[in-house]
Amino acid sequence: MPGKLKVKIVAGRHLPVMDRASDLTDAFVEVKFGNTTFKTDVYLKSLNPQWNSEWFKFEVDDEDLQDEPLQITVLDHDTYSANDAIGKVYIDIDPLLYSEAATVISGWFPIYDTIHGIRGEINVVVKVDLFNDLNRFRQSSCGVKFFCTTSIPKCYRAVIIHGFVEELVVNEDPEYQWIDRIRTPRASNEARQRLISLMSGELQRKIGLKVLEMRGNAVVGYLQCFDLEGESGLVVRAIGTACTLDKLSSPAALLPACNSPSKEMKESPLVHPPSHGCRSTHNSPIHTATGSRLTQNFSVSVPTLIYTGMGSGSAGKEGGPFKALLRQQTQSALEQREFPFFTLTAFPPGFLVHVGGVVSARSVKLLDRIHNPAFVGIMGNTRSYKLLDWNSFNSDEPETRDAWWAEIRQEIKSHAKALGCHAVVGYSESTSICEEVCILSASGTAAVLNPRFLQDGTVEGCLEQRLEENLPAGCGFCHIPYDELNMPFPAHLTYCYNCRKQKVPDVLFTTIDLPIDATVIGKGCLIQARLCRLKKKAQAEANATAISNLLPFMEYEVHTQLMNKLKLKGMNALFGLRIQITVGENMLMGLASATGVYLAALPTPGGIQIAGKTPNDGSYEQHISHMQKKINDTIAKNKELYEINPPDTSEEIIGSPIPEPRQRSRLLRSQSESSDEVTELDLSHGKKDAFVLEIDDTDAMEDVHSLLTDVPPPSGFYSCNTEIMPGINNWTSEIQMFTSVRVIRLSSLNLTNQALNKNFNDLCENLLKSLYFKLRSMIPCCLCHVNFTVSLPEDELIQVTVTAVAITFDKNQALQTTKTHVEKSLQRASTDNEELLQFPLELCSDSLSSHPFPPAKEHLESASSNSGIPAAQRDRCSSWIELIKLKAQTIRRGSIKTTVTVEKASPMGEGNFRNRATPPCASSTVGVVKMTPLSFIPGAKITKYLGIINMFFIRETTSLREEGGVSGFLHAFIAEVFAMVRAHVAALGGNAVVSYIMKQCVFMENPNKNQAQCLINVSGDAVVFVRESELEVVSTQQPTANCQPSCTGGEVTT
Amino acid sequence: MTSELDIFVGNTTLIDEDVYRLWLDGYSVSDAVALRVRSGILEQTGATAAVLQSDTMDHYRTFHMLERLLHAPPKLLHQLIFQIPPSRQALLIERYYAFDEAFVREVLGKKLSKGTKKDLDDISTKTGITLKSCRRQFDNFKRVFKVVEEMRGSLVDNIQQHFLLSDRLARDYAAIVFFANNRFETGKKKLQYLSFGDFAYCAELMIQNWTLGAVDSQVDDMDVDLDKEFLQDLKELKMLVADKDLLDLHKSLVCTALRGKLGVFSEMEANFKNLSRGLVNVAAKLTHNKDVRDLFVDLVEKFVEPCRSDHWPLSDVRLFLNQYSASVHSLDGFRGGSLSVGPPS
């Protein structure tokens, strides 16, 4: 019984009117955890109740602490009839369970109802007292940190990167239970929300257990997804990369308050488990998913011996043999693992040695219906939601899903091997479900890794140094990992244009972020391939077969499109490639997004040639040459636009023949259907030159046209789907994260592939255009991490969801980018250097906006002399509010001078407080919480990770028209989701969410019934950040830091 | 291909000032799009009409959602759904509560009731302000009125506290509330030449000097209602015109003081009795609600018009009135009397 959860309900505000007669509400609160429920008193007749309850104490297992959400229900007391629910708040207390994260959750949470949305707010304080016990049969994994960030979190250092962890749990979807026919939509939604929350908790705990067994202490790149399989159930699955992380001490030194002794005591012993022997099987009785995975866990300690043994003996060897040796060692380290996969997309310097190319696998599966009447009977008991119980009744179910994924992973692994690589990085998995057909997809980048980070033995010294000497900075990762004479696929190799020593391919596709030390010429840009294919409506197996037959063609076309667009941009590498295949009733959609760049190490791409089939026709010839000219012009224009002007390298020096304009594929993949038939697809276009576009029919014509219709973003805008834009490194601090959703209805019934393609293309292009228009005030800016998701909710509907962040940058400073890659890599690799560069700039812009608070009198005058409110006087506008508040304060307190103590929302207000001290935040009572899909915040330093945010919401309406139609409904819902995420982060004491991702946005409507429903799943990492400029100030004024609160207090006197 | 659903939600709520203005002015989405196209935004940004349409729709939806919060501005500050920087919040509130001069002149002093609301279409046609905008402005007046009507303390401060308006706008609202409460007639043809600013100026002075709050700022200070006792006391002024001696004395005092300083001295001298009688009668009648309402009409009829027909310059009027009230103090029995200032013209 190692935990005590304490909850206090403080107050409510802005509650809805529940009693029409009095226009007031008699509210009380139920606090539930597990099976225990407490209630507050009823606070009569108020919309702003002050409960100020006692501390409700729950004594619980740490297993429950991890699985269960804290459930807070606000109700309206009714003497004569049943109490009406106002809404609920689910609080995930997981962040309180690991050391150095949050210690208290305290703040205003929106009260959420699945039918009415947000209905007021409630102020709650939650604490956890954990008792340490080193128990033997541990089923909880408290202490393991989770990060959504797909790189090593900013204030940590990776000691060891252990590798892939995965888990899935399955349950019946409450929406499809028989009881759903008799319960209200609200009850059904809440059951679903609660179940998914429970399942996520359980999943996280299980993954944590695996990490502990691997002797790690954290999961990085944690990605959890839901598969709503409908009648056949609900699958929650997660993948991640187990790591051992060390907290970097430097930020802690700057923030001494964070290291309170109590927290030190909380430090879990799990971080440093007893080192003797391997954990025996009975250590983890719960962990019985698949036999194969057990071996994976056992293997961890073994490779150390091999590695150290061989490493010391071979230090003197030269480059070539050394490479082989390195590979051998890494391989031996990785071979022990079932899946040498890494969900990371950015790596510590030196980790990534070579990149092979993209590997992907897809598989079409039929979902079986589960009919298990015995199971339904027990669903009444809350505990039976759990997989453990579920398992005993439906033992084969999770195994089936596990086997499916294992199959795909195996395929990925073999592809990687074919590319001469023993690891897969930037690995991700996804599904697309339509009725009973499900496409499982996995993709990643085959790579050769440096064994240094992979195991316990910290092998410093000569080997490592040699390694770094041997790898020229900025091009090493481009060098081919496979054997030149025994290539896995036809490719055109040249000597590296950077170091001239090793061979490189002519084009490189990857799913990872651009390595920070890579030498890039010019800027990058977002490249998308979009494709639709009609398919006949069919049932079950026929349908699955039809889909499997279509998939290779889609992949081929998507690949061709990507290649052509890349050429058109004059670039030679793709990063962050993500291909999404979506299945619908009567069509398949393919959407590939990636960021194109020009890598200095790879050869200059050739142009695109157009060839006609019928050379005799004169006018046709003319047309062709006209097209050719247009294409050439576009390439030239793009080169200028993205500043691609590689130094002229004379081919003679390299001694290789001038490369023919030839296009080879780096994409190796296969798809298979349930029959396990593996067909490898060679995308190198056989003997035909992919460069030459043959216009032999209207289809090809369309293709060429669509190539040319992609309009570049307006000037001042850049876009990419990676973390940072290659070629821009002088970000300013303004960021705007957004989500945009569009649904179009396809009009005609007899659609052709071409019309479909055009519609889809227009949809995406228009969406991008809208974004550029909306964000025009931020120019010059870059849309980063642009993430498109396509779904086909109904027959004729296409839904596209985009989440991205717009970041402003300084145009002037961009001109001063250093040319030499050494400097560049230095500048970009170390944030400290960046700080030095940016600090002066930050400081002056800050001093402009943060001009000292003028005395209130001046405010009065300025306010009264101010008639209209021109835009230029926004500062004054804010000062009015300021002033009014000050006045209000003096009035209330009845004294002239009021000293306002800085309100600390949480004990770790350090970062918080400093943030509030800045003028824009000072006057707002609601602290600003930034959200970004990136792992960093420009111009700021992340000082603390507070835990993972993983939230699932359902919203339903039966008055769609009244809520502004589908747009109004979804707009409000997404705004509410943002608000709830922000509130949770603020309650944890944070001021930002990084690596934010909207994993699911399932929208269903029935306009005839005036109904709509939407499910949204979001996740991210709650963090505390400090502006770099402030950090600087604090570090220099450390001794006088204590006077700061009184200073701010002084400002607030009137 | 039709767009079924099209939304954009930012973590920081995007506010486009131009679109906000169009929305406040009561334009429909299509009108707003047309107006934006005319502003040349398409050429500036290279956007298409479809983009503009989608953008405008989006902003309108946001404003529609914000409107509920704007009805109680402190709510806008505390709500969690829209993350809006404070400067933008202030801008939203200030613009939402801003009103058109033409509109306010139409409803100033009218009862803010359903009846008046029904007349809004007439006002809309007359002023050229869209009905939607008229409704918003009217509802704003009514909302502010309802909130501060029964409240103690300074009217301006109350408004500022509950609606977070700028000082200037809060003063304007104080005038509107004051006029609405006392139902001063401002719509007569004779009063048309007066601007809202003129009335607001009067309102401010009246609030300062004629209300309960003016008498005793500590106890029971109500800025909205005129001080009944004070109005009762004004009856005493009748002496000034009823008592022939007093009238003469008063006149001579004023004339002595102003001789040579006034350009229209002779006219003033000739008219003194009429003017004084007019002013005093207006003041003395103020115990009746009906006459309170007609205060401005009466003042214009009895004082402003005679002056105007004699072509008094404004400075002379001011001098005269100051001297007129100042000399009263030196008359027996008029120590510590009050000041009455007519509207400037």
Image (spheres, coloured by chain):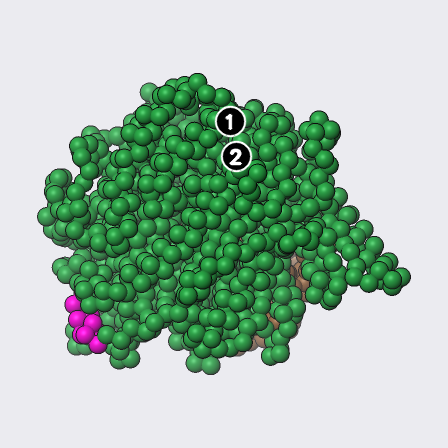
Chain colours: A green, B brown
Disc number for residue B313: none
Chain letter of mark 1 equals: A
Q: Residue at x 60, y 46 (%)?
A: A490
Residue A330 in the image, given as x and y percentages of width and height: 39, 34
**From where the camera sits, is residue A19 visible?**
yes
Disc 2 is attached to a residue of which chain?
Answer: A
Residue at 72 percent of width and 44 percent of height: A661
Nearer-the-camera pick, B246 or B137? B137
Q: Which residue is mark 1?
A: A320
Badge 1: residue crowd in 10 Å (few <14, some 14–19, many ≥20): few
Looking at the image, can residue A216 be seen?
no
Q: Say how many tags the image has.
A: 2
Write the residue at 56% across / 27% down: A824
Q: In this rendering, is residue A842 above or below A670?
A: above
Q: Nearer the viewer, residue B128 or B275?
A: B128
Type of amino acid under label 2 = Phe
Residue A83 pos. (x, y %): 20, 71
Disc number lying in front (2 or 1): 1
Circle 2 sits on which residue?
A: A477
Q: Quadrant of the C terminus of chain B?
A: bottom right
Range of magenta residues: A373-382
Q: Main secondary structure of the magenta part?
A: helix
Q: Based on the picture, tell me whether residue A1033 belongs to the magenta stretch.
A: no
Rendered position, A29 above or below B125: above
Report the front residue among B140 and A177: A177
Q: Circle 2 — which element?
A: helix
Q: CA distance from mark 2 to mark 1?
A: 16 Å
For residue A525, above or below residue A317: below
Q: Secondary structure at mark 1?
A: helix
CB contact under 8 Å: marks 2 and 1: no
Q: For mark 2, does the 10 Å Cα neighbourhood hold few (<14), some (14 to 19), or many (20 or more) residues? A: many
Write down the quadrant of residue A913 in the picture: top left
